Image (cartoon, coloured by chain):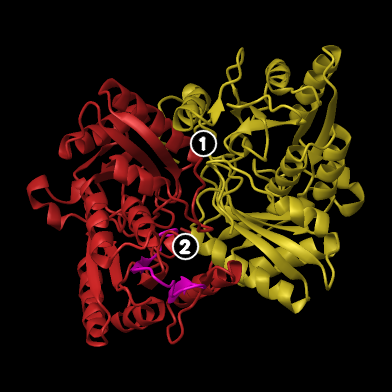
Chain colours: A red, B yellow
Amino acid sequence: MKKIINTPERVVDEMLEGIVRAYPGHLKIAPGTKRTVMLAGAPVKGKVAIITGGGSGHLPLFLGYTGQGLLDGTAVGDVFSSPSSNEIFTLSQAVHAGKGVLYLYGNYGGDILNFDMAAEMAEEEGIETATSIGTDDVASAPANEKEKRRGIAGILYAYKIAGAKAASGASLREVKKWTDRAIENTRTMGVALSSCTIPAAGEPTFSIGDDEMEIGMGIHGEKGVERGKLKSADEIAEIMTTIIIDDLPFKSGDEVSVLVNGLGATAPQELFILFRKVSMILADRKINIYKSFIGEYATSMEMKGASISLFKLDEGLKALLDAPCHSPFLLQQI
Amino acid sequence: MKKIINTPERVVDEMLEGIVRAYPGHLKIAPGTKRTVMLAGAPVKGKVAIITGGGSGHLPLFLGYTGQGLLDGTAVGDVFSSPSSNEIFTLSQAVHAGKGVLYLYGNYGGDILNFDMAAEMAEEEGIETATSIGTDDVASAPANEKEKRRGIAGILYAYKIAGAKAASGASLREVKKWTDRAIENTRTMGVALSSCTIPAAGEPTFSIGDDEMEIGMGIHGEKGVERGKLKSADEIAEIMTTIIIDDLPFKSGDEVSVLVNGLGATAPQELFILFRKVSMILADRKINIYKSFIGEYATSMEMKGASISLFKLDEGLKALLDAPCHSPFLLQQI
């Protein structure tokens, strides 16, 4: 797959440079780091700081969620590689406002290792820390091993809830409690139609037939639950939405937010065709949609495919979902 | 190219259904039409109504720019085909608030024909109309035949300025004047690395080698100015930005907004790598960036490629660019 880059080795650094050049009043590289961004106005007095991070190649994940009413800082690694623990620690010092730091990221081994090391360093410096881990991908482990599930696009909701709760001045304990509630209430499932190519590898991560799709594939190409002939949009929506609904389970009378996320090369038209069927299935089950997000919220470079997420709401979560937030990466909601 | 659709014939209607299901309080299909959307709150009293339209397959163009402080209604046709004049007329009646209608769309023969017919029907019904046509694509005709140029992603700026001016209560004449000023001040150039596939055709619109790119290609695959080996991001940015700067020309001391637009399958990372170099070139020339937009604003389904636009600002245009607007399709600016 052709890419508009200079050299594979420079992709991450030049992307970061592009981002801070694009939004100079909003984001900056944290002092003493190379691969982090922080809010230009951080530390924000009286507020728990929230940090996320992970491998590059998933924009707007992770950097794009650094924003007012969202996250204070983000650390990234090479494409699909974990951020450095030293950089996470340095970033923690830069954004910490005296009320502690919440680390919020997806459930991947390398990320956990490095965030835990950073947390240890931060605690030694007297910074109180807590950790919440996104585990929304229902395809990656059965319901009775929920803690093994990977985090994918549904982490959007955890970011939004965490950011809004922190902005309200809540304590670290309270912010973590609401963040975990958002994670518990979110379920996602993905489908891939084509592979992405890691710039340094130069070859597609996996091969898939011209007439095939894989349901449940992860955002780095991790094995899914079903490889088969490409089905229609309605059939794909039906399979994925049914698995998601049955997993929580979501029930008649529930109120949900729906996220239909494009993985990179999927035309926006197709996301709305998927959403159409998801909304019909939910209507049939008397599950009410409160608010919908359709677009690219977590990508895998030029992977063709999509994911569907449902987020079960209650009055408290709704208020936090509706709280104002600002990031130049985020789609505006009305 | 695999697509997540049901049948090619249903793509446009199901996409429209998905959109109005996704944003029910915001958008609706105009009564008596099948392929239009209008603001749920239109007609907006005391305001010139603005209508755009064109072929489907370019989301967020055109439907996504229907919003508060943006456009009142949008008519679309089949993929890459013009909207119906009857539907444009019916939409005009639905959104007209007594102050006239501005038709604002890209410079394509079929669109002009159908919008002009609709304008004639509207005038016969006593609706005052005016027309502004986007012509930002510098690759599509030389500077001395500017009126022949196609409209591409830079129409974003015309939409924003027109919408903000109309929202201020200005007359149709005033709204058109400022819209035309935005068009005159905008220049765009695109580059394509791969083709898109029209669903009903089932085959890529054009072929391009695995190591090739085409600079200046249009968003329907119209011939560009240079086909050659894929160059580096910095070289691509240099070629495109230089042509754009020399065309207006943009000069030292000018203040501009930059739009780096993804055509569909381009990873967001790559857009920021392009922007990085564009911003360096502008800094070298002492052209100041006021505000930047980086993301997918006008796509060609799953075409891989990008476009760069510059919009020359003055105090009046800056105030209108900064005026509040709302569409669930638009990237938020800080």
Q: Quadrant of the N terminus of chain B?
A: top left
**Chain to which mark 1 belongs:** B
Q: Quadrant of the C terminus of chain B?
A: bottom right
- Which element is circle 1 on? loop
The residue shown at (78%, 76%) is B286
Compared across the picture, whether A211 is left or right of B84 comes to: left
Query: Is residue A73 inside the magenta stretch?
Result: no
The residue shown at (43%, 31%) is A273
The residue shown at (56%, 39%) is B59
Same subunit under labels 2 and 1? no
Residue, far right: B144
Q: Which residue is denoted by mark 1 in the rendering?
A: B203
Front residue of B173 and B4 = B173
Question: Which amino acid does the dot numbered 2 rest on?
Answer: Gly
Quadrant position of residue B71: top right
- Could you tell me how far apart the alpha carbons at marks 2 and 1 are, in whole angstroms? 42 Å
The image position of residue A332, as x and y in percent, is 52, 47
The image position of residue B141, as x and y in percent, is 83, 48
Q: Which residues are magenta?
A: A36-61
**Does residue A305 appear in this view?**
no
- Mark 1 neighbour class, 10 Å CA radius: few under 14, some 14 to 19, many 20 or more: few
- Which element is circle 2 on? loop
Compared across the picture, whether B232 is left or right of B120 comes to: left
Quadrant position of residue B56: top right
**B69 w.r.t. B56: above or below:** below
Query: Is residue A57 inside the magenta stretch?
Result: yes
Q: Which residue is denoted by mark 2 in the rendering?
A: A67
Front residue of A206 and A169 = A169
Question: Which amino acid does the dot numbered 1 rest on?
Answer: Glu
**B143 w.r.t. B170: above or below:** below
